[in-house]
Image: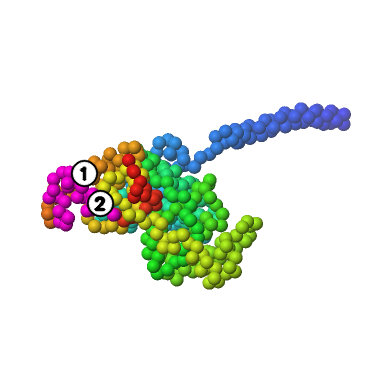
């Protein structure tokens, strides 16, 4: 019995010795298993995991196409590149195939839909420019018009606007031209020089806007791209600016089918909302808002409009001796309304060659381009251009004076930047 008790005592002492060793081994094994996991967490805190396309781009490889779920700020190809001579020539010789419409969720990504609409609107306009005698300035006007229209739509919704739209004038165009396509283009230097010379819009237009009529509907639609776009962050704001932006957006929809009733309804609805916003703040309201509403209020606004014909952007200019002030206007978005030859050819040659230059170099360039253009016209076969005023039959300097007075004077155009007055000494 004593022997059995001794045996049990020895067994208990052995278990007591083995148990701490086993516990220590289990604890050590547990730390070894956790150690790689802790290292991974610490490493990820220092070097966060990057998507595969970003890693590929950092390694110099071409990143994989990004879906809107991965890159939701802009579509591939937006903004479109600023048109340069080589790109426009290539486009006209071999027009690119239309890009497929991006597959977007039906209830999201409205900002990407607006970008896709802008890209879709630019393509046919560039194709139409290929039929012009001077496709480059036409393409640049189309680029500017489409992106200004895009920004107008961006400010028509209560979301964060595309960052370039929050700028205005030359700064906005420089921002758009520095987009992904422009940076990757081989002619980025030409694009940058041209955008630096881009236009600044006129001051905030006078108020109130005229009532749409059958007489002014052509100007409402035809000159819409020349009127000022949304102001920048430091620009004016308030009910008048909001009314103008809403009207331009609504006019754009009405102009698609030339509906006067649509434009008039937009004008009336816009003024009613303007008066409600005016009454919501403790400032002096516009006198027409105090007419109560209806036709009396509409007649008051219509009679108070400083430009009821929407013709503030229309001007008659002489292209005979273009100086810095006139060239600043011509290098901004314009719409040439005088179609008689040789005005389109000569004006296109001037804007294409001179507008990308610094302002101080444009005047000399314009005079040289006009002289070369006149010489080329007069050397062309008689059936190519008939010269109805007979200027080419004269010798210099009478030939140049004949062109100046018979062809280059009294040219009508729409201009986003007002040209100098006729009595201005533009040198």
Q: Which residue is mark 1?
A: 371
Q: Quadrant of the C terminus?
A: top left
Q: Quadrant of residue 183?
A: top left
Give the secondary structure at mark 1: helix
> Mark 1 or 2, which is nearer the eye?
2
In the image, is residue 254 part of the stretch drawn in magenta?
A: no
Picture coordinates of residue 75 (x, y %)?
A: 43, 50
Q: Earlier in the sequence, mark 1 or mark 2?
A: 1
Instruction: Give me the residue at 17% from left, 55% from top.
Output: 389
- Residue farthest right in this picture: 2
Near-viewer residue (271 or 425): 425
Residue 159 visible? The answer is yes
The residue sitting at 16% across, 57% down in the picture is 388
x and y percentages locating residue 98 in the rendered image: 34, 56
At label 1, counting other C-alpha atoms closer than 10 Å, the crowd grade (few under 14, some 14-19, many 20 or more) is few
Instruction: Say which quarter of the image contains residue 358.
Output: top left
Residue 125 or 15: which is nearer the viewer?
125
Number of callouts in the render? 2
Determine which residue is flagged by label 2.
Answer: 408
Q: Nearer the viewer, residue 332 or 38?
A: 332
**Label 2: few (<14), some or many (≥20) within 10 Å?**
many
The percent coordinates of residue 336 (x first, y second) are: 31, 55
Q: Is residue 246 visible?
A: no
Q: Single out the residue that lies furthest toward the front.
A: 423
Instruction: Answer whether residue 400 is magenta in the image.
Output: yes
At horizontal 32% and vertical 43% (from top left) the residue drawn is: 323
**Spatial distance from mark 1 to mark 2, Cα to Cα?**
12 Å
Residue 64 is situated, as x and y percent measured from the top left of the image, at: 42, 45
Identify which residue is drawn at 42% across, 61% down. Answer: 310
**Which region shows up in magenta?**
386-410
Q: Which mark is residue 388?
A: none
User: Camera-side residue: 371 or 389?
Assistant: 389
């Amino acid at each position: 019995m004593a022997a059995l008790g001794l045996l049990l005592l020895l067994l208990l002492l052995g278990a007591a010795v083995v148990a701490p060793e086993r516990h220590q081994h289990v604890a050590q094994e547990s730390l070894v298993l956790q150690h790689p996991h802790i290292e991974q967490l610490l490493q990820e805190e220092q070097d966060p995991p990057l998507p595969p396309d970003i890693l590929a781009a950092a390694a110099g490889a071409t990143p994989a196409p990004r879906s809107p779920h991965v890159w939701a700020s802009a579509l591939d190809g937006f903004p479109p590149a600023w048109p340069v001579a080589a790109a426009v020539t290539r486009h006209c010789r071999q027009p690119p195939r239309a890009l497929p419409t991006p597959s977007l969720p039906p209830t999201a990504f409205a900002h990407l839909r607006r970008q896709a609409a802008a890209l879709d609107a630019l393509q046919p306009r560039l194709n139409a420019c290929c039929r012009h005698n001077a496709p480059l300035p036409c393409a640049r006007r189309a680029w500017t018009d489409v992106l200004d229209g895009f920004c107008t739509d961006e400010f028509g919704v209560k979301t964060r606007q595309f960052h370039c739209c929050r700028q205005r004038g030359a700064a906005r165009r420089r921002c758009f031209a520095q987009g992904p396509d422009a940076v990757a283009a081989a002619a980025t230097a030409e694009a940058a020089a041209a955008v630096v010379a881009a236009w600044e819009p006129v001051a905030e237009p006078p108020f109130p806007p005229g009532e749409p009529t059958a007489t002014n509907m052509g100007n409402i639609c035809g000159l819409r791209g020349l009127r000022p776009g949304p102001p920048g962050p430091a620009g004016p704001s308030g009910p008048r600016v909001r009314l103008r932006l809403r009207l331009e957006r609504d006019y754009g929809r009405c102009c698609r089918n030339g509906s006067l009733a649509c434009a008039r309804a937009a004008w009336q609805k816009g003024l009613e909302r303007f008066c409600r916003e005016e009454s919501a703040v403790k400032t002096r309201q516009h006198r027409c808002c105090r007419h109560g509403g209806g036709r009396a209020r509409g007649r008051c606004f219509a009679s108070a409009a400083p430009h009821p014909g929407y013709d503030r952007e229309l001007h008659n200019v002489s292209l005979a001796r273009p100086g810095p002030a006139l060239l600043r206007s011509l290098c901004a978005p314009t719409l040439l309304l005088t179609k008689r030859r040789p005005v389109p050819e000569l004006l296109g040659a001037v804007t294409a060659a001179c507008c990308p230059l610094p302002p101080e170099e444009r005047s000399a360039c314009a005079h040289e381009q006009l002289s070369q253009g006149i010489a080329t016209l007069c050397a062309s076969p008689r059936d190519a251009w008939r010269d109805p005023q007979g200027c080419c039959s004269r010798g210099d300097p009478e030939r140049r004076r004949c062109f100046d007075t018979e062809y280059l004077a009294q040219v009508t155009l729409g201009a986003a930047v007002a040209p100098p007055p006729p009595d201005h000494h533009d040198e």
